Amino acid sequence: MRKFLCFLSVALLIGELLATCRVVAQDTISQAAVQEVLLERRLARLYKRMDSKDTVRLSEINSQPFISVLEYVKGQASGLYIQEKSGEPGAVKQVVFRGLGSPVFSQKDAIHVQPTVYVNGIPIARENNFTYGMQQYDFNRLGPATDNFAGIDLSTIESIEVVKDPLKLALLGPLAANGAIWIRTKPGKGGRREISFSAYTGVATAPSVTPVNAQYENLFRRQFYNRYATPADELSYPTYLNDSTNVNYYGPSNWNQLYYQNQPSYNANLGIRGGSDRANFSFYGGYTNNGAAADDTRFRRYHALFNVNMAPYKWLNMGTVINASRNTRDRNRSLRDRFAEVAYTPNLSVPMSPNRDVYQGYLENYNTVIDDNIVNAGQVLLTLDLYLSKKLMYNTSLSIDYSEGYRNTFFPQPLMEENNFISNYFGFNQRYLYSNKLFWEHEASPDVQLNFAAGSIYQEDLYRYNYARAYDGPNDFVRVNIFNDGNVFTNQWSNREDFRMHSVYFSAAMRYRDLLDVKTLLRYDGASTVQPDNRWLFTPSFAATYHLINGSGRSSQLFDQLDLGLSWARIGKPNFNSRYAIGPNYVSDLAWGSEAGLLSYNGFAVVSRPYSEGWVGYNMDWAYTDHAALDLDANLLHSRMNIRMSAYLKKDQNQVIPVPIPAEYGYSSRLLNGMSVQNRGLDMTVTGQLLQPSAAGLHWTSSVNLNWNRNKLTSLPNGLQELTVGQRKLEVGEAIDRFWLFQNQGIYTNIAEIPVLNGEPMTFDGIPFQPGDPVWVDRNNDFVIDQHDRVLQGNAMPKVVGAFQNNFSYRNFDLSLQFYFALGHQLLNQRAANKYDFINNEGANTLDGIREIFHWQQDIDILKYPIYNPWSAVVPYRVNQDLFLEDASFVKLRAASLAYDFAKRPAFQNRFKTMRKAIVYVSGNNLLTWTKFSGADPELTDFNGYYSGYGLPLAPIYTLGLKLEL
Amino acid sequence: MKKMFTLSKLNRHAAALFLTIVLLHVSSSCGKKLDIVASNAGADDTQWASVSDTRAALMGIYGLLRAAMVDNYAHWVYGEMRYGDLVPYIRADLRAVADNRLNASFPIVKELSNWRRFYAVINAAALFIERAPAVLAVDRRYTERDLKFDIAQARTIRAFAYFYMVRIWGDVPLLTRSYDDGIFAEVARTPERTVLAFAEEELLAAAQELPYLYAEGSQQYYGEGFNTWVGVLVNKISAYTILAHLCAWQGKYLNAEVYARFALANAQQSRIVAYSVNDLVNRTSGLFAPSDKNQILAIRASYVFSEATATGHIESLSLAYPLVTRTRPDIYVPKDTINKLFLQASDTRFGVDTISGLITTNYFTDFNGDIPIFSKINVIRAGDGDPDFSLFGSNIVFSRLEELQLLYAEICAVLGNTDEAMLYLNFVRSNRGTSPFIMASGSDLVDEIFAERRRELMGEGWRWYDQVRHARIKRNNPTVNTLIEEGGIFWPISGEVLQRNRKLIQNAYWR
C-alpha cells in the first residue's frame, strides 16, 4: 500500500507535467497586475493556517503578562483544558484535549495525553521521560524543568489556532494524535514598513495568609497526645514544641513577610517588518522578566524572531523563519523539591522557625547557592514552494526544533547539615523534519473542484541528557566542577533516546458547488519505536461538510449561514520508548524502592531482564486514536451571533499498559497493548454582539465556550475487567481519572461501637479495629476492611470546562473580562492527610513529613477532620479515603483589562500621521476565585488530582502597559 | 510566442528542480532509517555474545539479590525485628513487625510480604544457567573454567534465594527454569521440603564446581585480580555453609553436621579466619567495611564504586547523633536488654566493670545516654565518612566464621557431641574475652550457644531464625513455639502476589 502511494504520486506528477506543458502552451494571459496578486498570494501561502474556527482572540490576552503558549490558549477554545499546578513562572502545566486518552497516575504520565504545539508547522519536541528512571521522586523532571512552551513570546504571534477537526489532525499525523495547537508567527509583509513597540510593567501582589506559630501546632498535636498517647509516645514528643519559652517557635510568626512579597514584572518588545512584492522580512525581539509573589521565583526570557521570504521567480517562492529564545528562571526553595533532587534526606525532625528573623538568616545561605536553570530553544524553518504550473504545486521544507536545558546547582553546607551538594545537568531535544508535498488543484467541471495532495514526512528525534552530582565537598568556597578524587561522592548518568518516523500520505478533496465538501486522507506511518513486524500503520480518514445555508442562494430568516459536518479519522499514537521496538530486552536493574540511581555492582555494569520495568514481548503494536465529530456552525441574526457545536467521540485504542503477571517470574508486570479509553462530549462556543455597534458607540461582545466531557475505559488487555495500579484502580466502564477510596463514616469512640462477628471484632486487613480508629464502610460485609471495600469515587478531571468572555468598547476605550471555570471534579487533599498523619510521616523521615516554612499557616480546615489515633496500625489518616475528597470546582475572574487607544483621537492622528495604534492599558490577572475547596486554590493540584499544597499561589498581577504601532 | 516560451521554460526549471529533490528524497528515505539500535536497552540477539555480557549478567544476579535483601530493610526487618533485641523507637510500622502483626497496613509491612524481588534473582539465575553456555562458542575469551564458576555461582545464589524465602514464607512455588518466553503460567506453592531438597541438591552440585578463591595468585577472573573479587563472590565455603543452615533449619542436623564440618575444616583455604572484635567492627577495615577480608557470604555496597546508599543499610535505622545528624534512631537495643545479655566485664563486645564503672563498648555508642546507639555496624561512606553526609557502604554479612563456628557448636550440641560443641563455643568466647563455658556451671549448653549467637550476631539478621531453631530444639519459648505450631513464624503473602497468581493460597495463620 505504501509503495502504491509512492507510485501514485509519481504517476500523478508525470501526468500533470504532461498536462502542464499543454496548458502552458495555451496560456497567453500575463498581465502584470494579475501576476502581482498571484505573487502576493503565493508568498502568503508559505506559512499555512489550519483554517480552524477555534482561534485565540489575541486582542483579549495581549495585555496580560503571560509567558507560555498554554497560558495564551487557556479558556480561549472549547475542548482544551489547561491546568496550572503552580504559580511559579515557567513551571510545567497540564493540557488535555477532549479528555484523558490514557490515565495520569503521576507527573510523568502527563506527557502522553498532551497535544502538540506547532510553530509555523514545526512540532515542538517535548522533554523525554527517561530521566525519571534515575529519579527517586518525580515532583519535577530532572534539569531546568521549564515549561516546553515558554519560548514563544506573545508579541511575535500572528495567530493561534486550536486544531480540533479530526481530518486536520490526521493530516498532521501521529504527533497530533492528542490534538494540536497551531501557531503562526508574524510573517514579513510587503509595503510600508511597520514598526511596533510594546512594553509593560507590573506587580505580582503578595497574598494574605494566616501564619501560625508553635503554640498552634502544639494545640493541634496535644489533642492526639492527650487522647491516645502512651507514656513512651509522650517521651518522644517533639522537643521544639515542648519548650514554650523558645521564642524561635513560640515567638511571633511572621515568616510570610519574607516569603510572600510584591514582585515586579516587566517586558519590552520591538518589531519591524516590511519589504517589496518580491521579498519581505520581519524581525521581532524582546525581553521579559516576570516575578511571582511567592518564594522569590522569577522567569526571564530573551527572544528573537526573524523571517525572510523571497520570490526570485514566480514559480519559486521560499521563506525562512528563525525563532530563538533563551530563558532562565529562579525556582522555588521548598525543602521537598531540594531534597528530592539531592536524593538525600537529612534529619527532618526539627522544622524551620516561623520567625522572620530566623528565616532571614536561613535565606542568607541562599547568597552562595547556585541554582541556574537555563533553556535555549529555537526553531528553524526553510520552506520552498515550487509551482510546476498554476495548479500543481510542490513544497519541500526542512524544519528543525532544538532546545537544550542546563541546570547547575550548588547548595552550601548550612542548607544540608554541613554537607554541600553540586550538580550539573545538560540535556537536549533535537528534532528535524523533512517534508515533501505535491499539491494539485483540478477543476473537473464548473461544479466540481478537486484537490489532491501526496507527500512524505521524515522525522528524526534525538533526546539526550548528562547529569552528574557530587556531595560533601571540602568546603563551600571551592565549588570545583564535578570531579572524582575518591573523597567526593560523585555519580554520573546519561541516557539517549532516538525516535524516527516516516510517513507517506495521499489526500483528496472535492467541492461540489458551494454545497458540499468531501475530503479523505490515507496515510502510512512507520516509527522506529514499533517492532519491525508491526512497524507500518495504515490509517484512513474521511470528512464531509454540507453547507445547508450559505450567503449565495439558499437562505433563511434566522440563519445567515449553517454548516453541518461529519468527520472521522484514525491517527497512530507514537511512543518514545525504543525499548518497545526490541521485544524482550535487557537493562540495568539495580534499583530498589528507595534508591533509584544505582549503576553498578562491585563496580561492574550489569544487565538483566527488565524485572522492575516489566516484560516486553514480541507483540507490541501501534496504539491509535479514533476521532469522530459531528459539527454544526451557524451564523444567525445577521451575523450578530455565531454558534459552533461539536459532538465528538474520541477513542484512544490499543494502548500499552503494565498488566500483572504471576510474581514468581520476577517481573513487576508485563507491558501489553489493549487498553482503550473513550471520551465523548460536546464542545460549544457561542459568540454574540449583545449591543448594536451603532447604538451610542457602546459595543458589547460576549462569548461563552465550554466543553462537557465524559470519560470511560472501554477495554484492558487480555479482556481484563479491572487493573490496580498503585493507589488507583482502572475498571472497564468507569472513567480513568477516578479516585479509589475507602468510605469514611466517622470514628469508633468506644469498643462497643466496633462491629463483632462470631466474637471477633471487625478488622482492617487482619488488624482489629480499636476505639479511635475510623469507621470505614465494609462494602462486601465480610467484616474485613481491605482493598475490596474501596470504591471508585470522584473525578480528577473536570466534567465541564470553559470560559465566559466579555468585551466592551466605548469610543476609544476597551474593557475585557475573562471568567474561567472548571466544574464537577474533585481533589484529594494530601496536604491535610500529611499533616494529620504526622506520626508515620515524621517517624519514617520521609519527604511527606517535611515541614516547610509555608506550612506555618492555617491552610487546612481543622474542623473538618475527626481526631483519630495517629499511632494506630490501620493508618487512620491515609489519604485514599473520601474524608480527604473535596469538590475542586472553581470559577475565576482570570483576566480583566482596560485599554485606551490614543491613535483613534483625531488630534493625535493629525500630529502623528503614521501612528496606527497607541494603546495604554491596565490589566489584572488572577483576580478572584470562587470555590468550595477548604484549602487555597483547587487549581493548584498535581496532575493526578492530589492536592499537595506545594503549588505557589496564582496571585493577582497588575500591569500597566503600552502598545505602539507605526 | 516569446511569452509562451518563457513560461514553459520556467516550468521546465521548476520541474528539473523538483525532480532533483524527489530523487534525493527517494534515495535517502528508502534506507533502513527506521531500524535503529536502542541505546538504553539490549536486544535478545545482541546479548550473550561476549564475556562482558556474561560478567554483566552475573553481576546483575548479585545486584538483584542486593536489591531484594535491602529493599525496605528486608534483611533486618525479617531477621531482627520480630521479638528481637533491636526495638523500634517511634516507628509504628516496625513496632507492628516486632509484635508479629505482619498483616498491619503499613507500606513497609505490605511490601515485605511481596516476594517478587527474590523471584527476580531466581529468574535471572535460571536465565544465566540456560544462556551462558552459548557464549562459550561465540567468544573465545570465555573459558570452560569461567563458565563452570559462573554457573555454579548462579546455582548457589538461586538456591540461597529459595532458602531465604522458605524461612520467610514456608511453602513457595518452585521454578527451576527461567521460562523466558513471555507465557508466565500460574504455579502453585511447592511444599517447603521439596523446595529445600531442590536447593540442597543444587548447592551440593554447585559446591563441587565452586573454587575456594577467585583469581588466586597470578590467575585472573574476568580480567581482574584477587583484590577485586575477594569477599564479593560466593565460593565453596559459602555453598557448604548455606547447606549447613538449610539442613539445620529443617532439623536435619546429621546432614548439617557434615556440611558445617567440611566448611569449617576448609575455611582456611578460602582465607576465612576469625577476627577480634576490634578487627571485626573497625569502620574502615572491619568485616562490615569495604575490606579485603574474605567472608563466607556477604553482599557488597562499596562507596568507592558509588554503591553506598542512604537507605537499605542497617545504619539508616540504627544510627543517630552523634554518629550521624539525626537525633534519634529508628531502632535500638534497650539498656535493660544489653545489661541482661552482656554479663561479663571482660567481654570485648560490651562489658561493664561493676567496680570501676568502666565500659567496654564496641557494639554501642552513648550507652549512658537515654538511648544507646547500636553502632556495631557503622560504615559511613568508605568507613571514614563524617556524620554530615551519611551514605552507608557496609556489607550485608550473611555469614562469617564465628557464625559458622556457633552453628557447628549448635549442631554438635543437638547431636550430643558435647565436647565438640563446647570446643567451638569456647573458641568464640575466648576470642571475645569471656570465660569459657563449663558443664558444671549448671546452665544448658544449647541455651548458652544460642545466647552466644545472640550476643555475637546482634544486628546481623539472625535473631529471629535463631529463636525459631532454638524453640524447635528446646521447646522452651511458648510464644515462638505456638507460632511454629500455628504457622505464625511465616509472613503472610502479600495481596498483590495472591492476586497475580490464583493458584496461590495464603498462609493459614494469616487467612
Image (cartoon, coloured by chain):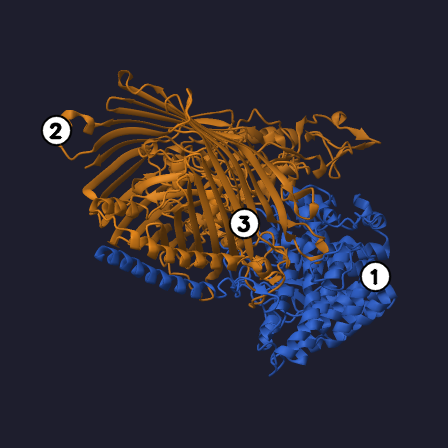
Chain colours: A orange, B blue
Circle 3 packing at 10 Å, graded few (<14), some (14-19), many (20+), is: many
Measure how far apart labels 3 and 1 are at the Cα level.
Answer: 55 Å
Residue beneath disc 1: B194
Q: Which of marks 2 and 3 is in front?
A: 3
Residue type marked 2: Asn
**Residue of label 2:** A910
Residue at the bottom extreme, as displayed:
B218
Quarter holding the C terminus of chain B? Answer: top right
How far across and down, in percent of the image, does residue B84 sit? 72, 50
* Secondary structure under the numbered disc 1 in the rendered image: helix
Q: How crowded is mark 2: few (under 14 residues within 10 Å), some or many (20 or more)?
A: few
Q: Which image quadrant for residue A876?
A: top right
Q: How crowded is mark 1: few (under 14 residues within 10 Å), some or many (20 or more)?
A: some
Kindly tell me whether residue A622 is visible in this rendering: yes
Callout 3: helix, strand or loop? strand
Q: What residue type is labelled 3?
A: Thr
Query: On residue A539, which mark appears?
Result: 3
- Distance from disc 2 to disc 3, alpha carbons, whole Å, reads 60 Å
Query: Between residues B206 and A254, which one lies in front from this camera angle?
Result: B206
Tell if the residue under mark 2 belongs to the same chain as the one under mark 3.
yes
In the image: residue A847, left or right of residue A259: right
What x and y, as percent, mark residue B463? Answer: 73, 55
Q: Which of the image's four quarters has the N terminus of chain B? A: bottom left
- Specify whether residue B410 is in view: no
| Element under disc 2 | helix
